[in-house]
Amino acid sequence: MKLATWNINSLKMRLGRVLEWLTASATDVLCLQETKLEDATFPRLELEAAGYGCVFTGQRTYNGVAILWRRELGEASDVVAGLPDFADQAARVVAATIAGVRVVCLYVPNGQSVGSDKYRYKLDWCKAATAYLRQVIAAHASLAVGGDFNIAPEPRDVHDPALWEGSVLFSEPERALFRRWVELGLVDAFRLFEQPPNTFSWWDYRMLAFPKNHGLRIDHVLLSPALASTCTLCRIDRNARKGEKPSDHAPVIVEVAT
DNA sequence: ATGGCTGCTTTGAGCAGA
């Protein structure tokens, strides 16, 4: 199974790009973040016509997550939206079981700046996510968590770690929360393999960040130990950041056996 | 060349993203 995660920064703007990329990359399951669509306007029929099933939870303007999959894989089961035990107005989590794999799609809050109310919300949200992931790990041996985590785990995930030290996306409390998820048993699929240095998943639209490769690796696929033991590839498709009207994020792709 | 923000919103300046 090829499974990927991609913050698409408006699915309305980029549905065509998503469909082209799904076909070209032969992706089986895709987690999307920042769809920015209410459920009533989600392009379910277009996706089904193209051969993909979808589950989603969304809202106007902000947030919104979805999981798409090739319909040959069958139906999704046990669809759950949101974090249990966390009152959240934002649509940031959706989960489903597809072809025997529990797939959790996350959009972690950005946090805006260290010390802000939004940063506090990010830390609280991540603590609730930790409790949720602990439950999901206990219930599902075959688990993939794909998402925009808005956390760069290590200095090598940041183009200029000295510049970013202490900033939102790379502050120590955020990195500590990411380590908690690894301590629960989740495996950062990207680090299972030797990777080209300076591989990132997000580049600011401003300041020529992409051509200068001034990026961060903040989008991740975390795997349960059983699924990680079958993982044969993890890479970031930098090419998807090119061309007309790209998202500011590139997809992260894994291959696992099911 | 991959190029100097983008998408969204009570349509137009301000917010949010990261």
Image: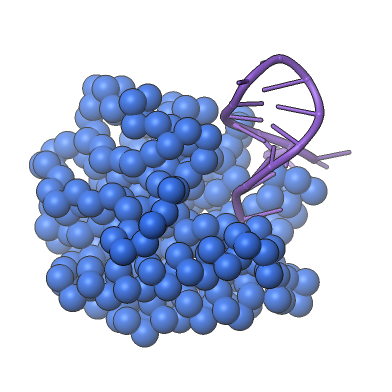
Chain colours: A blue, B purple
Image position of A120 (left or right of A19): right
> For this view, does A155 lie left or right of residue A188?
right
Residue depicted at x 33% and y 59%? A83
Nearer-the-camera pick, A175 or A116: A116
Q: Is residue A146 above or below residue A37?
A: below
Residue A204: percent from left, percent from top: 68, 50
Q: Nearer the viewer, residue A233 or B9?
A: B9
Residue A178 percent coordinates (x, y):
47, 75
| Quadrant that contains the C terminus of chain A | bottom left
Spot occupied by residue B10 in the image (x, y as percentages of width and height):
63, 20
Residue depicted at x 58% and y 37%: A246
In this rendering, is residue A172 above or below A33? below
All told, the count of numbered labels is 0
Q: Say which residue appears at 14% left-offset and 51% top-offset.
A: A78
Q: Is residue A94 visible?
A: yes
Question: Relative to B6, does residue A235 appear above or below in the rendering?
Answer: below
Q: Residue A129 is drawn in which quadrant?
A: bottom left
x 44%, y 48%: residue: A90
Residue nearest the viewer, comparing A181 with A80: A80
Q: Is residue A194 visible?
A: no
Judged from this view, the residue extending furthest toward the bottom is A183
Q: Name the spot of residue A218 as percent of width and height, x first.
A: 54, 62
Q: Is residue A112 above or below residue A190?
A: above
The reply, left or right, for residue A102 in relation to residue A246 is left
Q: Is residue A7 left or right of residue A80?
A: right
Quarter of the picture holding the N terminus of chain A: bottom left
- Dividing the picture into quarters, in which one does residue B15 lie? top right
